[in-house]
Image: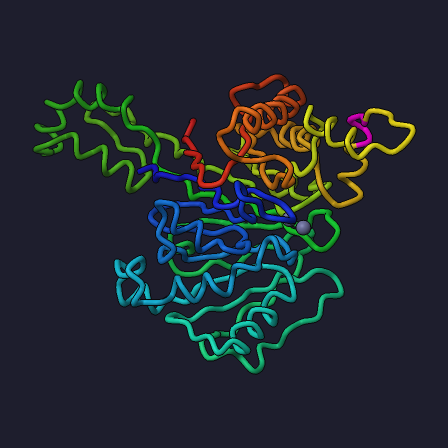
Amino acid sequence: MVVALDITFLGTGSAQPSATRNHQAIALRTDGEIWLFDCGEATQHQFQKSKLKMGKITRIFITHMHGDHCFGLAPLLCSMTDNLNPANQNNSQDEQRIPIDIYGPSPLRSWLRTTLTSTYSNLGRPYRVHELLFKDDPVDQNLSLHNNELPGENIHLNSDHVFALPLFHSALEKGYRVQAAPILHSISSLGYVITEPDSPGKLNALIPIIKKHAAALKEQHHLSNPMTLLGDLQRTNQPYTLPDGTQLLPPPRRPGRQIVILGDTYDPSAVAKIVTSENPAVLVHEATNALTKLDFMIEKQNKRTPYSPPTFEDVEKRAKEHGHSTPQMAAAFAKRINCQKLILTHFSARYRGDDSPEAKEVMEEIRNLAVAAFDNRDQDVFCARDLWTFDVKMTS
Ligand SMILES: [Zn+2]
Ligand SMILES: [Zn+2]
């Protein structure tokens, strides 16, 4: 069975939050669980404004240690593990015992430990931090753990220069895979690639064949309901020989969707090699800076003399100097990995995320900049806004 998979953008702003954009946090909902990517300040408030239940978070992935991506982590952990919190009361006692796995770069583990310890915070569930270590990062030895902390793994880049993340509990049992690669930003930053397990193939084409042989199957193979063969083929994935000797082949399994979520970056090239799908379902890419009518206006107001209008090259240069991307840069990477959908996020505070005509016009300009650089694929490019949910469709 294909599971529902969607992505809710809890925060879509960069650097400074605004009245219309919170700091970055992205909730991937799959198979009844929430996997959270980044946890900017006040992410728990965003959960309260959304339909998502923070008690359903099982895993948290931090892309990098800039505060706009992790300042909300300690308070969120306190609230989401508070078993008296009505939002968490649907969780079973077993769920309340399973540790929350948190992944991210150094010094996430010691920072979180210090924050929780020095604020006398106790959690209702255990947690552990698995650190993805870049070259020359200090290795935390899991000493002096917080009361609710379990030792986490220290994950080094493998020989392919990739982090293969150990998954636990349901994600391991169901066959999910998560890999990460270092991407270029002003500090160590990560791009994550999440791969769903394959799902059983479509059975529709087999129904008329079984119907055609139904009488013979009943008589010669003593199958009172020949349609049960459909379930057997899915379960065993083995061919079945029909009474006339022809082989009924199980339908090819459907590859799981692949989702790419990047931290802040001006060059995510290293992620391209861990994208194994020929057609990943979604790429979430930052587009902090752009050149729109609004930017021309702001530049003019701040004019230096002599004033010359900014160009795309100027904006790209400036974005790169700060470790960020433009919509065109995001589209270029989307093209490179041949993704089905591109979602832009992490916008500068000047780009408001509300419903006013002015804000919508600016966001449409930003989207169009990416569309033009993505082979004019107008249907495939989106600008995220706070609390917007994107359904990830299964296309094959
Ligand atoms: Zn940021
Ligand atoms: Zn950053």
Which residue appears farthest toward the bottom when viewing the image? 144
Does 53 sit left or right of 184 as displayed? left
Does 21 sit left or right of 50 as displayed? right
Q: Quadrant of the C terminus?
A: top left
Residue at horizontal 42%, vertical 44%?
A: 197
Magenta: main secondary structure equals helix
Residue at horizontal 55%, vertical 31%?
A: 383
Identify whether 208 is placed above or below 320.
above
Examine the image and state in which quarter residue 41 appears: bottom right
Q: Where is residue 67 shown, x and y percent of the image?
A: 62, 57
Identify whether 33 is placed above or below 279.
below
- Number of labels in the image equals 0
Residue at horizontal 38%, vertical 66%?
A: 81
**Chain part drawn in magenta:** 310-314
Q: Nearer the viewer, residue 90 or 259?
A: 90
Q: Nearer the viewer, residue 182 or 349?
A: 349
Examine the image and state in which quarter residue 237 appears: top left
Q: Quadrant of the N terminus?
A: top left
Residue at horizontal 56%, vertical 43%?
A: 261
Q: Is residue 27 magenta?
A: no
Q: Where is residue 21 shown, x and y percent of the image?
A: 54, 42
In this orientation, does residue 278 appear? Answer: no
Does 231 sit left or right of 346 as displayed? left
